[in-house]
Amino acid sequence: MKQYLNHTIGILLVLPLLVFFFYKSIFSVNPFEGTYAITQSLKSLQVELHRDILRYRNNQIRQYDTINQTTKLISELNKDLVVPVEHNKQLDISGNIIRLKKSFQDQAELVEDFKTNNSVLQNSLFYYSRVHTELDTVGLSGLYENVSVDELGRLSTLILEYTRKPEPHIAQKIYPILDNLNSEQSSELRTLINHSLIIIERLPLIDRIIRQFNSLDIEKQLDDLVTAFKDHQATLDQQSRIYNSLLFFCSLYLLGYISYMIIILKQNRNILVAANKQLTREVDERTRTEQTLYRLVEETSHISERDYIFNILHALHKSLNIRYAYISLVTDPESHVATMLGVLDNSEYHSDIQYRLGHTPCEEVLRTNRLVHNRDLQNYFAGWHNTHLSRAESYIGITLRDEKSKVIGVLAIADDKPIKNTNLAENILSLAASRASTEIARHIALRDSERYHTGLELIDNWLLQLIASADDIDKFHENISKAAREIGNANMALVPLMEKSGEYYTFVAASGHKSQRLIGTRLPVGDGCLCGWSMQNRQNVRIDDVNKDSRSRRQLTNQYDVKTAYITPIYLNNEVYGAITVFRDKTPFDEIDEQLINQFAQRIQLAITNLQLINVIAAEKERAQVTLHSIADAVITTNVDGKIEYMNEVAQSLTGWPFTKVLNEPVQTVFRIIDRDTREPMQNLIETCMDESTPINKSIILLIDNSGNEKTIECSISPIISKAGKSEGVVIVFHDLSKRRYTDNILLHRANHRNNRR
Amino acid sequence: MITNLAKFGLLFAILDCASSYAFAEERILPVLDEPIQPIPFDSSLDPAKVALGEALFNDPRLSKNNSLSCASCHILEAGGDDNMTIGTTINGVPHVINTPTVFNARYNFRQHWNGAAESLPEQVDLVLRNHMEAGSNWNELLTKLSQDAVLVSSFNEIYAEGLTRENYLDALNTFERSLITPNSRFDQYLLGNKAAITEDEKKGYERFKEYGCISCHQGINIGGNLFQKFGLFYDYFAERGNITTADYGRINVTNKESDLHVFKVPGLRNVEVTAPYLHDGQAETLQEAVDIMGKTQLGKTISEADIELLVMFLKTLTGEYMGQSLAAKGHTIAGANHGSDTSAKQGSTDDESSLASSGGNGS
């Protein structure tokens, strides 16, 4: 490209020159051409004018029309004569023209002066002519009586002489004669004298005008101008010749350059065509490969993971024409262990092969993200013995990443000979990798999800067993430890319980790795054990290597050959109740494990709380019933609708209604009371009590029992108010005044107390 | 003595010999044509332009208040002037100078008494902008005229650019160039018709040449081709008194001391019908004018007999316009015009007319 740029600049540099020379040689016009023509016309007019002026002077012409016409033409041409912009300083044509124009103006004035003076002179000459005629015809005596003919003759002779040669000494001779004549007082003589004087004065004046006219020397100026024009024309011609030759050479150069360019372009074109062909071939190959790959992957994407992996590897094998291809799953690069999800050796396929990462190209890939090794692989990775890639010489591998860019595996191809087009192979591998990593990440997620749900089911099952064993607290704890071990998929599970003081804890249950001997061990919180730390700080703890954790107690963990741990505390009524502790030999606990164990701990918490509550409620209820049954006053309770909920024995005997019959009947049915004096029914007392939420005490009212007998009673109706302040019914306490008792207040108090508890 | 006289007589026949320093060969063939030339026939003028120019010539919109056209002062029927001592102005106030005739003005080398205008278009321009004459300007005039659809279309027919200053001047100039008066009796005589003028008139022409009038009044227009001082031998203005700016003459144009009282020599064609005479119109008859000219310009009192001869010659210079002699027509129209125009000048006009006619009868 740079080459073309240079050529373009080469041509572009020459082109303006070419145009310039062309313009100069073809369009070169003498800027004075118009002026030259005007000058020529002026020249001929000027000659004419000069000639005419002299003719007038010599009285050969007697009218001024021709001279006026010439002068007018000259003046018009003079107006057209433009002072040109000077191109060549040496010529100074402008200066000449300016001088010339000025001369023409001067000349025009001189011509006017000449005409005026000449006409006067001519007039005077006519006069002398007439004098002569009159002398001849009329005779001297008639006109100039007192002038002698000699005198007049002398005067005319002198005038004649003066007209020939207007010199002062002749004029000096004339003046005395005129003085003599002047002495005479004749008007004719005065006229004669005047005309003589005019001739004497005007002749030299006219000659002076003509001398001035000549001194302007316009013809000479015009000649000079013409010469200057011709010189300039000659210069221009010469320049034109030079530009012509320059134009010729320039054209020649350009022609040569263009021919050269054409040759170069032709050569370059051939190169380009070849390169283009090559490129087209490569593009074709690549497109074909990619299409193959895509087709293979797309066609098979719906089938299972294993087949999916196989298909990716198979597609790579087919499209790149290489021998080996494999996908490895690396869940934890720290563990130095990877799993080959699938490995293809030509058509031979193996899956799920675990191998150590140490000194393998796979490890190199994980470290550098991408590895391209095109020969001598075996020598480079000397400590590497892999049966599945035994003959690999070249290798390309890239990491697989999930959507959070976390490394999840390696996709690699290898061959027993160098790979031809590594760029292409790399690109294709990238395409396959993006596809494979998506799939693998999806499968991992699916597997996690399945594991979680299985874990939840496990938890449910174990809870049922736990509840069943709730009576026996030791069995209950043991089940917890077993359940934790199973749910956490752990090698060992411990259940420590916190003492109330919060200073010691005791292992109440253990499972796995002969850990039963730990049961009963009582340890102080803060002695460096992980369980204690977790319970004390109320934090979940996940540890990938207990031996390296500062909070752990080395002796304990060493004894039981465990490495990873997870601990979550169990709370009860906001107090730390205990903890669930699980250990594994190698595999670290992941998020799923964490979630499951947390879930389990919460469920246990709930279960324990529920069990304790159930116990408390049952005990209270029993106690209340016993109390109500055992008191001596009659007691009826209703719900919020005024339906009977409960009657004790005394109430049944006083009203004469069996409880079983009137349960959920309106209380008015049973408790019929009237005023002893007015015998008005007083059932509205219950409604009033409910509406106003205030207790009502009445003494000496009549109760009508089931059989219609009237009994004098004293009664107290109190609303039952829930904790939330809502009316939930009434409690009616009454007794037969004839068997007066004094336990009213106590009973009422108890009833209220019961309601509060509930 | 006789020898002396003979030498003196020879003086003018071979005057060219006196100048020994130029054109030897020209001396052998002296040109002795008459100094007066007949009016040449000119057929080069475009009739359409002439017609349009005539319309403009008669158009009073030329002046600011639409009162005066060219024809108001240059009355063709009255000899191309206004036959008044001093011209009139747009305000009705008298002008400062006598109106020259427009006939044959094309043969004048300058226009105006003082030669202020180099050409006819320039003269129009000066008149248009003169506050005493048209008192207008180009913008105003063209605006006025452009509202006249008929006139504008006439212009458009003739000129590509339509109504413009240049075209206005061109049309008017063309018309003015058509204002020539050929076929005067003297022209016929010059063209070979010996019987066209009487013996007395021939004598008058001889006097015209002898007295030296011919030294200024020559050429086609019998004058109009040079400047001359008025009062070469005699101070006209001292006697007349009451000197005005116009009397200063060409000095008003050139500011040259030598141009004081210098005027363009007027042409003498149709002089019969252009009374009164001189730049101030002080000479009411040709006789008076000839007398004054003799005194002032020739330094001679011309005898009455010679004046009559000269006047007779001058009357042969009256030519024809549109095939009709200006002499016959000029009197009637001039009289009518004066009757309706200026009552103040009535008397003198009548006198002029009678004088002019009596002069004519006399010949």
Image (cartoon, rainbow, N blue to C red):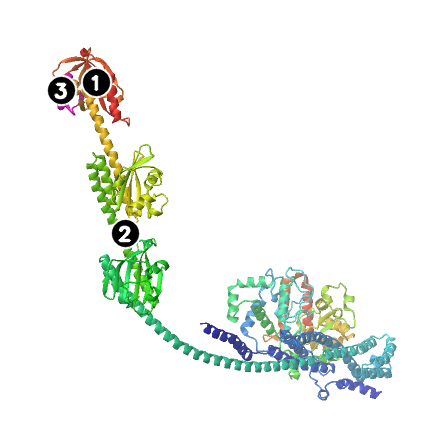
Determine whether, in the image, residue B132 is placed left or right of residue A714: right
Q: Position of residue A507 (x, y in %)?
A: 28, 38
- Residue indicated by mark 1: A733
The residues tagged by marks 1 and 2 sit, at their Cα atoms, a distance apart of 67 Å
> Which residue lies at the image location 57% right of the left edge and 70% below the top edge?
B171
Circle nearer the N terminus (1, 3): 3
Q: Position of residue B239 (x, y in %)?
A: 78, 66
Determine whether, in the image, residue A701 is placed left or right of residue A541: left
Under mark 3, the amino acid is: Trp
Write the start and end of the magenta stretch as one range. Answer: A653-667
Between A135 and A332, the residue placed more toward the observer is: A332
Between B161 and A551, the residue placed more toward the observer is: A551
The residues tagged by marks 3 and 2 sit, at their Cα atoms, a distance apart of 69 Å
Circle nearer the N terminus (1, 2): 2
Q: Is residue A533 above or below residue A318?
A: above
Identify the image quadrant of residue A665: top left
**In the rendered view of the protein, which quadrant contains the N terminus of chain A?**
bottom left
- Determine if the magenta segment contains residue A56: no
Q: Position of residue B335 (x, y in %)?
A: 64, 67
Q: What label sits on residue B158 in the rendered view?
A: none
Q: What label sits on residue A657 in the rendered view?
A: 3
Q: Is residue A720 above or below residue A451?
A: above
Circle 3 packing at 10 Å, graded few (<14), some (14-19), many (20+), is some
| Front of the two marks 3 and 2 | 2
Under mark 1, the amino acid is: Val
- Residue indicated by mark 2: A445
Circle nearer the N terminus (3, 2): 2
CB atoms at circles 1 and 2 under 8 Å apart? no
- Mark 1 on the same chain as mark 3: yes
Q: Is residue A663 above or below residue A50?
A: above
